[in-house]
Image: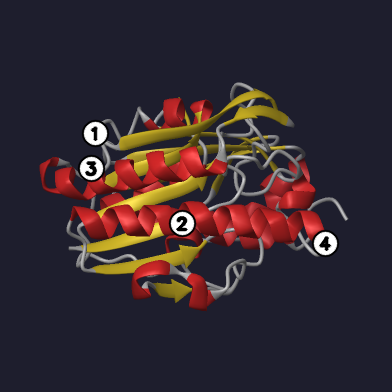
Amino acid sequence: MKVFLSFDMEGVAGIVDWDQCVGPGADYQMGCRLTLGEVNAAIDGALEGGADEILVNDSHWKMENLPPDELHGNATYLSGPHKPHYMMEGLDGSFGAVFFVAYHGSISGESSTLSHTYNPAVVSHVELNGVRVGESGINALVALAHGVPVALVTGDQRTAEESEAFMPGAERVVVKQSITRFSASNLHPEVARQLIREGARRAVERAGELSPPAISLPARLDISFHNADMAEISTWARGIERTGLSTVAIEGEDPLSMFRSFVAMTYLTRQVEGR
C-alpha cells in the first residue's frame, strides 16, 4: 500500500509559538527536530502496518523544513513552496491512505494552538457544506477527488474534533490539549511519537475498511476574509464568486477543481494581504 503523508508543524507536541515554526533561529531548529520525530513515527507505524511506499509532502511555511536524509523508511520527500496542489501535491488514485500529521485547528474555531486557515492575515472563516473547517477539511477535497480515505489525523484536540465531520473513520491521535492559541498541555515528545506510531499502524491496517471523505457533492466552500479587498482580489481566480462585502464562495461537482480555485485564491491574496 502507498501512503501519502502531508505534514504541518503547528500540531506537533511542544510547539506553541510562531518562532518555533518560522525560521531562522534556535527555536525554529527545535521545532524542525520535534516535527521530524513525529513524521518519522508516522512513517515507522505505516511500515509496520503494511505500507510499502510513503510519500511525505512538506506542507508547512516554505515547505522545506526537514533534512531529507533523516526521514525513515526511505520515504520520498516532496518539498518546495510552489506546488499546484500545495499541501496535497503528489496525491493520486494509486495511494491507499492519506495521513494528516501535526495539523492544527481552524482560525474561527475554539482556541487551538497557532490556529489559522491557510493564511491568518487574510482568511477569517471557512465553511464546507455549511460546516466550519480548517485545513484538514479543505485538503480532504483532494482525497475525495482521488477516492482515497484519510486514515490518520494528528494534532491537538480541536484538530481531532474538526476532522470528525468529513473523516469519520480516521484514526485520531491527540498529542496536546490546547488551552489558548499560544499555550497547550503537551505530551512528552517520546510519548507523542509512540502514540502516532501506533495510530499510523492501525490506520494502514484499517485503510481498506475506510471510505473517501464524507463530503457531499455538489459541494460549496464559503470563505470570509478580514476585509473587502481580499474578497475582491480572490475573484480574479477562476471559480470564485463574491457573495458579500468580505465573503466569496466556491461551488462545484469537481472537488479537485474547487481545491485548485482555493489554492489560487491563497496565492493571490498572499501577494497583498494588507500591505
SS class, disc 3? helix
Left or right of residue 228: residue 76: left
Give me the residue at 36% from left, 51% from top.
99
Q: Which residue is label 1 attached to?
A: 169
Label 2 Cα crowd, 10 Å radius (few <14 / some 14-19 / many 20+): many
What is the three-letter code of the residue carrying label 4?
Gly
* Up/down of 157 relative to 99, above or below: above
Give me the residue at 28% from left, 37% from top.
170
Give me the residue at 64% from left, 40% from top.
14
Res. 25 mark? 4
- How far is disc 1 from disc 2 in space, using C-alphas? 21 Å
Label 1 Cα crowd, 10 Å radius (few <14 / some 14-19 / many 20+): many
- Labels 4 & 3 near each other (Cβ < 8 A): no
Task: Give whichever of discs 1 and 3 has the lower sequence position.
Answer: 1
- How far is disc 3 from disc 2 in space, using C-alphas? 16 Å
Q: How is the image coloured?
A: secondary structure
Q: Which residue is label 3 attached to?
A: 202
Q: Nearer the viewer, mark 1 or mark 2?
A: 2
Res. 39 mark? 2
Q: Position of residue 127 (x, y in %)?
A: 49, 32
